[in-house]
Amino acid sequence: MTSDLNDSGTGTGSAPALACSGIRASYGPVQVLFDAGLVVEQGEMVALLGPNGVGKSTLLKVIGGLLRPDAGTVSLGGVDVTSLATRKRVGMGLCQVVGQATFPSLSVTENLSMHGYTSGDRKWTKEAVEAALAVFPRLHARRDQPASTLSGGERQMLALAKSIVSEPKVLVIDEFSLGLAPVVVGGLMELVRRLNERGSAILLVEQSVNVALSLVDRVYMMEKGEIIAEESAATLAADPERVRTLMLGGHAAVTA
């Protein structure tokens, strides 16, 4: 199973599950993030919203260790992981779900088994895979099928199901509703809630504002590589005009 941050001697039970502060990041000479930061408390669900191209995916790369920031820190459970490789962050309880990412030639069961590798315990991995399949009956019925034969909604279920196997302390989900029918998205939203109830703090990056606001506790809005607003989901849901302004890139209108 994934390691407990509180056993490391440096994390604390009261520390946020995920925290970023003062993140600056660039692609070559082009700076993309400007002192970006956010916090996800233990057991909380938080959304990161904003128009396309404002740096949300870049911030996720920094969180996952795929891009080294020029400045700033990333911590998991109070432990500074800014200089740690991605695999070490995974071992500390970080899991990212990006779209419908699966191994197309592997079966559903094999895909899930791949995500139990950090435990080093085959018996536990097998039990975890069965537990995941029990939560997703549609996947259980297709457990021996290659992932390439699944529908878009089923592939997204498979991407989420790996979170049960890896038992993340922090689950980062990027655009899980993209291209899916509303009825499928509704079912997936309930599954995200169940993952949160199982103990995962969740950071959701989502283009559908309605989906995000109906799921999360708090929202960060990003524009041009900066966090420009932090609100409760309830506050934003009650002010659709402000949401529209923020999503269209209304920094000046908000801060004026």
Image (cartoon, rainbow, N blue to C red):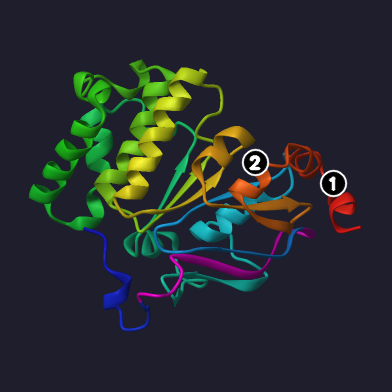
Left or right of 9? Residue 68 is: right
Image quadrant for the C terminus? bottom right
Residue topped by disc 1: 250
Q: To which quarter of the image does residue 89 belong?
A: bottom left
Q: Is residue 19 magenta?
A: yes
Give how far across and how far down residue 95 sits, in percent. 40, 52
> Most prominent secondary structure in the magenta stretch?
strand
Give how far across and how far down residue 228 sits, in percent. 76, 57
Q: To which quarter of the image does residue 72 belong?
A: bottom right
For the residue carrying disc 2, how many other residues have a C-alpha within 10 Å: few (<14), some (14-19), or many (20+)? some
Residue range highlighted in magenta: 13-31
Residue found at the very far front of the displayed protein: 238
Please give the name of the residue rendered at 56% of the width and 40% of the height, measured from the top-left corner: 212
Left or right of 195? Residue 229 is: right
Give, as a three-letter code, the residue at label 2. Ala
Residue topped by disc 2: 237
Please give the name of the residue rendered at 79% of the width and 60% of the height, measured from the top-left corner: 29
Q: Are marks 2 and 1 in contact (CB under 8 Å)?
A: no
Residue 13 is tagged as none
Nearer to us in this view, 247 or 147: 247
Left or right of 201? Residue 131 is: left
Give how far across and how far down residue 206 sits, in percent. 59, 39
- Secondary element under disc 2, as helix, strand or loop, is helix
Q: Is residue 17 magenta?
A: yes
Nearer to us in this view, 185 or 122: 185
Give how far across and how far down residue 183 sits, in percent. 46, 18
Please give the name of the residue rendered at 35% of the width and 18% of the height, measured from the top-left corner: 150
